[in-house]
Each structure stands twice: as structure tokens, then as C-alpha cells.
Image: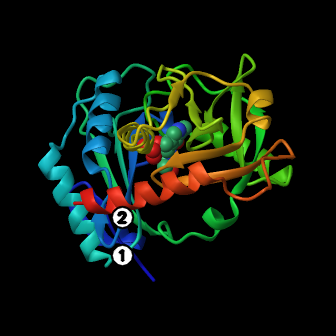
Amino acid sequence: MSRIVYVNGVFLPEAEATVSIFDRGFLMADAVYEVTAVVEGKLIDFDGHVRRLGRSLSELGMENPLDADDLLGLHREIVERNVLEEGLVYLQITRGVADRDFAYPEAATPTVVLFTQVKPLSENDQAKTGIRVVSVDDQRWGRRDIKTVQLLYPSMAKMEARARGADDAWLVQDGLVTEGTSNNAYIVKGGAIITRHLSNDILHGITRAAVLRYARERQMKIEERPFSIEEAQAADEAFITAASTFVMPVVAIDGKILGDGTPGPVARRLRAIYLDEGRKAAI
Ligand code: PDD
């Protein structure tokens, strides 16, 4: 099945979509992106993704070529053209095409690309069993708050996790977990939800913000602070969040099984709340 994708103002079949070899996204990873979940053909947490995109662009001194209405229109159109019921919309904006140079070009027109991916999100087999994570040294750059396409190290960490018989990696810096390869990391102890505080060390997850808001509204206890792998292994339960997984239970950390090895009650409850509230607020 061939998708319809979007490149610089045009919707076209994916096989016909091209970007220049001089695009700075290709040559320098000089590009930012967003991934928005779609359930029942509607966009989840869309405003949050638009706000974070604006921030990523401005931190890199890039003009935002599209306002919030343009972005919503493009997202809706790509969902419609691909008859996407459930899955993801990927959006990437690069600084554009220029002769190769480390300095930013003075005038370049940003490249804008969107495509869809079909993915089971609301009913997902992994959510029923939970995933296994292993710890990997966090060797990424220091501005993880900017959602750039420099994803080679997270890819390497994911491959290391697979080689070690796990599903994903939790990245560790100075003995403390920063986040997952493409998700935010949480543990639960004595009913409290513990997740690293926001800083340049992690991506400010849109799903994280929503889940913590829903948890606070329900008087659940939240501690925003770092935790170690040892503390996580002694926790009652653990989970991750991302637009691509929603709330996903973690059942083993570096081979240590948490609780009875099945998704914990807090993770299951937060997943149900997020699905319910996300659907209600979807646009
Ligand atoms: N990744 N941390 C990292 C490093 C991420 O790459 C992501 C998302 C998150 C969660 O952010 P959000 O809740 O806004 O999706 C945290 C996306 C899904 C990806 O790269 O596919």
C-alpha cells in the first residue's frame, strides 16, 4: 500500500517524494520533528506538539514556516488522504537546502515533510504484557529538550537493548536515569509516581505533561526527581510514555522482574485515563 505524503506544499505518492541531497536535514541533522498520535482519525494532544515544535525551531534560530492553523490543516489532510484510523503523523522541518557549510545559511527555505504510519495504539499487545528495559549509558548531546532528528545514539541504544533480549533501553547519566530511547521513564513506589524533572537533559514529553496533569487532577502523588536503576529495580512498578506508546508498562529492568512481572495497577490506570481523556480532547 502506497501512502500519500507531503513535501513542501505538495501531497503526492511516497515513491515520488524527494528531498535534495543538499538539504541540511540530510547533511547535518539540522532539523526538528514531531510525532502526533491519531486515534479514531483524530489528533491527540495536538496543541502541545505544535507548541513544542515552535520552541525547538526557535532554540535553533529557525523560522517557523507554518502557523498553528496551517499545521492543523496539514495534519488533518494527511490523515484524511491516507484514511488513517489509528497510528502516527510524522512531521519534520529542516533548515532547508544550501551548499554544505557548518555555518547556518543566511537565507534558506525550510523543507517540510509529513507522512503517516499505521500503528495499533489503543489496543496494543505490548501494553498487555509490558516491556523489558535495560540500562545503557546516555551518550547523547546536551540539548535533549530540542526535538532534533539526531537519533543515531537512541537507535544504537535500542539495538543494544534488543541484543540483550530487551525491548528498549533506559539511558543513564551520572548514575541516574534520564529517559528512554524515545520515551519518558517513570517508576512507582508506595503509590507515588516518580519521573525525572524537566531540564535540558530530557525531552519535555507532551504525553508526560498530559499524564502528570491527569494524575494530579486525581490527587495521585507525583515526585519530579531523578532516580537510579537500583531504585527502579526496587520499585513497585514502572512505565514509559510517548505519543507512539501512550502509557506502556515496564515489567523488567536489567533482568530484574518488577512485582509479579505483569503490568502494575498504576500504569494500567494511567493508560486507561490517558486513552479516555486523550480521545475526549482529540481534534
Ligand atoms: N519520541 N523522550 C524522547 C527522547 C523521545 O524521543 C520522545 C518521543 C519522548 C516522548 O515525547 P512525547 O510524549 O511528546 O511523544 C521522550 C517520538 C515518539 C519518536 O521519536 O518517535
Identify the amino acid type marked 2. Answer: Val
Which badge, 2 or 1, comes first in the chain's sequence? 2
Which residue reaches farthest top?
174
**Residue depicted at 72% across the width and 42% down the height:** 236
Vertical arrangement, residue 42 with respect to residue 240, above or below: below
Q: Split into 4 quadrants, where in the image is the N terminus?
A: bottom left
Which amino acid, by three-letter code, is at mark 1?
Answer: Glu
**Could you classify mark 1 by the number of other residues whose Cα lies within 10 Å: few (under 14), some (14-19), or many (20 or more)?**
some
Read off the residue under disc 1. Answer: 85
Q: How is the image coloured?
A: rainbow
Secondary structure under badge 1?
A: loop
Image coordinates of residue 217 in percent, x first then y, are 35, 40
Residue matched to label 2: 38
User: Would residue 84 be found to the left or right of residue 69 on screen?
Assistant: right
Q: Quadrant of residue 93?
A: top left
Q: Is residue 142 above or below residue 10?
A: above
Q: Judge from the rendering whether residue 280 lies leftward or rightward of residue 1; answer left or right.
A: left
Q: Is mark 2 within 8 Å of ligand 1?
A: no
Q: Which mark is residue 203?
A: none
Mark 1 Cβ and ligand 1 under 8 Å apart: no
Q: Are marks 2 and 1 in contact (CB under 8 Å)?
A: yes
* Residue 137 shows up from this direction: yes
- Closer-to-camera residue (103/261): 261
Q: In the rendered view of the protein, which quadrant contains the C terminus? A: bottom left
* Residue 83 location (% of width, % of height): 31, 79
